[in-house]
Amino acid sequence: MKNKIDRISAIRDIVQNQTIGSQEELLSQLQNKGYAVTQATLSRDLKQMQVAKIATRDGGYVYVMPDVAATIKGGLSSHFIPPHSMQGIVSIECSSVLIVIKTKPGYASSIAYNIDIAELKEVMGTIAGDDTILVIPRAGFTTTQVAESLCAVLPKQK
């Protein structure tokens, strides 16, 4: 049987890297990794870790780590999209006019290229650095509309 420290680490890894919408899904992922844990123990672990459950744009829910929850609750971004299922993407945030995509180092130019060749009607263009992409929306589209269309073309986690 694996110890609590290892289990907490596994929970953190799963929540940070996968889209998990329920404790049942999380229990299943933990069992796949060799952890025999009850729902009650998992619930206590999540409470201790201060893992939050937030609503997604599609009406579902997703578990997030406390730092992500604080960003959303703190109002740093009213249009934060948790990027759990997007390969190489750290965050997507919208101002009232522009969208900034933070990526892992070295990923920005290839992701920007994918956005550009998708020829989204909502996107005028992109500017990419090493780990940041600036997405410029076309007139008449909100940043929320642009961000939602981006999610359809961004590379998915395997």
Image (cartoon, grey):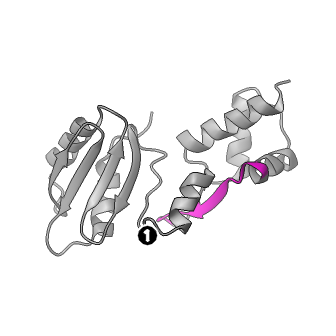
Quadrant of the image for the N terminus?
top right
Q: State the image coordinates of residue 108 (x, y, percent, origin top left).
A: 26, 39
In the image, 54: left or right of 86? right
| Residue labelled with disc 1 | 78
Which residue occupies the extreme bottom position in the image?
140
Q: Under tag 1, what secondary structure?
A: loop
Q: Residues within 10 Å of mark 1 (few under 14, many from 20)?
A: some
In the image, 124: left or right of 143? left
Q: Is residue 29 visible?
A: no
Of 13 and 158, nearer the camera is: 13
- Relative to 82, does residue 113 appear above or below in the rendering? above
The kind of residue tagged 1 is Ser
Q: Is residue 15 visible?
A: yes
In the image, 116: left or right of 142? left
Q: State the image coordinates of residue 120 (x, y, percent, origin top left).
A: 18, 57
Q: State the image coordinates of residue 59 (x, y, percent, origin top left).
A: 53, 67
- Relative to 132, does residue 104 appear above or below in the rendering? above
**Which residue is located at x 86 percent, y 42 percent?**
38
- In the rendered image, residue 79 lying in the magenta stretch gets the answer no
**Which residue is located at x 32 percent, y 60 percent?**
147
**Which residue is located at x 23 percent, y 53 percent?**
134
Of 5 and 35, nearer the camera is: 5
Quadrant of the image for the C terminus?
top left
- In the rendered image, residue 51 lying in the magenta stretch gets the answer yes
Q: Which residues are magenta?
A: 48-58
* Residue 130 falls in image quadrant: top left
